[in-house]
Image (cartoon, rainbow, N blue to C red):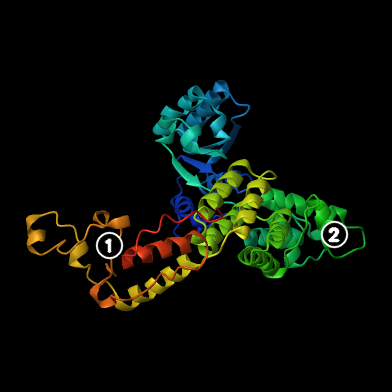
Amino acid sequence: MRPRRLDEVVGQTHLLGPGKILRRIADTGRVPSLILWGPPGTGKTTLARLLAEHTQSAFCVLSATSAGARELREVVEVARRRRAHEGRGTLLFVDEIHRFNKAQQDILLPHIEAGVCSLVGATTENPSFEVNAALLSRVRVLQLRPIEVRDLVALLRRALTDEERGLGARKLEAEDGLLAAIAHTAQGDARRALGSLELAVDLVPEGETRLSREVAQQAVGGRALRYDKAGEEHYNVVSAFIKSMRASDADAAVYWLARMLEAGEDVDFVARRIVIFAAEDVGNAEPQALPVAVAASQAAHQIGMPEAVLPLTQAALFLALAPKSNTALTAYANARKDVLRAGSLEVPLAVRNAVTPLMREAQYGVGYKYPHDFEGGVVPGNESYLPEALRGQRYAHPGPRGWEAAAWARLQQLREGTGEGGEPEPAGE
């Protein structure tokens, strides 16, 4: 099922869409030296091969895991002769280029500069750390992204119906929802998705005409397939997860978290939802919520599955049990309405910095009261730094729970001049 034309490539629209860089390169007929950086199964080798065919260049493949300096020099010499005698360019594709040592990478430098061949390297590692600076300065790095589920579904459907190159000879039917479930477990890897589909088709007994959920589940290694047509179940489950944490139902939150992760949901997607929830639904009722969520997200991304379930579960439990406040959401929404309605209102003179004599003459900073000069670092009364037209408006309405409530009560005491009242205790103390 390897694409035979650029138009058959699924995903990578940020590189292959109309007017995008790889599409423009193909249309010019000349391939500059590139490094394709991306996860496995995202089309690095395929794109290199198609660029060579599209530009009528010879395609030469080396693997950095096995090729050495001798093989590199031989390939370059053949490319030199081809260019001199045939007038034809060579696209040298080096798979896993990050495995070349500095000396091997340096061999390529003069030949790239002289135009003897175009280098296209493929790597799953960050080129900034794995490719030496001299080579990196002579190539263009293009980052490939994991293939989205909808694109993988289209690829699986094509494989299931293509009788020449795919599995169409079996005449099997499959719901889009089942193909979406297989795609989810592939985590953006087209090879993995196609391999799972091929195994699933092989497991279908002779005489049956439909790919069943049970067979597909065996093919993907027993992962629960819970994503139905158009991904509705995907959104149902994540909605249940968020609402369980919001309702402080720790048991349900962990259950729905497990449902997502065991179904093959993208770990980064789950982590992002946890971080958003920390700011949106817990906020300053428990100021540690966001640091815990961000730390869990970073840890999950760093260690990957299956251990990523541990920091994600820790964060989900913390957020479910924490006091709740949606002040961040409501305060921003309230302020945004006035920003959109009133436009760019003048900044009050009192809070403008008077950094030049002309600004001081224009009364910049006049009337400003320095909060540190007052008890508790708060100016008594209802001092407002809002634009004149918005004086008296309230955007932040702190909730009655946790640190936020204690902090607001202390602030009101100081504004009213009734004493400092002590620092608010951290929520949960």
Report x, y in % for residue 38.
56, 45
Gap between marks 1 and 2, in whole Å? Answer: 68 Å
Which picture quadrant has residue 97?
Answer: top right
- Whether residue 133 sits left or right of residue 121 in the image: it is left
Note whether residue 194 is visible: yes
Determine the residue positioned at 28% across, 65% down.
380
- For marks 1 and 2 on the same chain, the one whose residue lies earlier in the sequence: 2
Residue closer to the observer: 124 or 417: 417
Q: Secondary structure at mark 1?
A: loop
Position of 305 relative to 95 (above/below)? below
Position of 144 relative to 116 (above/below)? below
- Whether residue 215 sits left or right of residue 304 in the image: it is right
Report x, y in % for residue 16.
51, 56
Point out which mark residue 197 bears: none
Residue closer to the observer: 106 or 144: 144
Report x, y in % for residue 319.
60, 57
Q: Residues within 10 Å of mark 1 (few under 14, many from 20)?
A: some
The residue at which mark 2 appears reads as 214
Q: Amino acid at mark 2?
A: Glu
The residue at which mark 1 appears reads as 379
Q: Amino acid at mark 1?
A: Val
